Image (cartoon, rainbow, N blue to C red):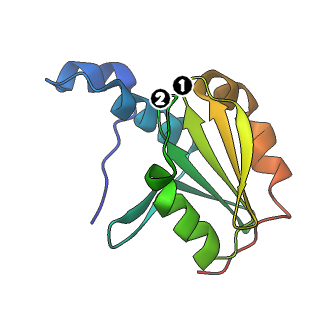
Amino acid sequence: MKKLYISSTTLLFHLSENQDFGRVVENLVINSSKARFFWRRGTSEVDCILLNEGTTIPFQSKYKNDIKKKELKGLIKFLKEFSVKKGYVITKESDEEVMVDEHQIIFLPLWKWLLQFDKIATENTVQNRVDF
């Protein structure tokens, strides 16, 4: 199954009858990262998989503050299955790091992620190499 993302978030607002800001943020995260992949296995999913110089960086877009562990099951499953040490969750305001079964999950507010994305992509180049 494929996903479709529109390059203009403004156009997305105009095309959508239902103004779902979470979906707009996911679209923004995908487009600004230039990620070309997502991952789905059964009901588990990761919104964005960035491959950068052989490094795998998974991102989950959850534009809210109260994020339950069950909402991260796709990200956690991906981290375990591919032995990736670190994953990111783009949030509304949450800014913290947690460890889940020896995997680091970094929660970053959207504004901070947009400002630091280039740094995030380069600092992960050596740490998360994965062969699919």
- Which residue is drawn at the image coordinates 35% and 24% (left, top)? 21
Q: Quadrant of residue 100?
A: bottom right
- Neighbor class of circle 1 (other Cα within 10 Å; few <14, some 14-19, many 20+) is many
Query: Mark 1: which secondary structure?
Result: loop
Q: Give the amino acid type for the residue marked by disc 1 in the picture.
A: Lys
Residue on which the image places disc 2: 64
- Neighbor class of circle 2 (other Cα within 10 Å; few <14, some 14-19, many 20+) is few
Query: Mark 2: which secondary structure?
Result: loop
- Which residue is drawn at the image coordinates 28% and 27% (left, top)? 20
Q: Nearer the viewer, residue 83 or 99?
A: 99
Outermost residue to the left = 17
Residue on which the image places disc 1: 92
Q: Nearer the viewer, residue 38 or 11?
A: 38
Is label 1 in contact with label 2 (beta carbons under 8 Å)?
yes
- Whether residue 25 sits left or right of residue 51 in the image: it is left
Q: Can the viewer see residue 47?
A: no
Residue 124 x/y as whole percent: 80, 55
Q: Give the amino acid type for the residue marked by disc 2 in the picture.
A: Lys
Residue 111 x/y as whole percent: 63, 21
Q: Is residue 10 above or below residue 119?
A: above
- First in residue order: circle 1 vs circle 2: 2
Figure quadrant of the N terminus: bottom left
Residue 23 x/y as whole percent: 35, 34
Residue 88 x/y as whole percent: 64, 47
Q: Quadrant of residue 24?
A: top left
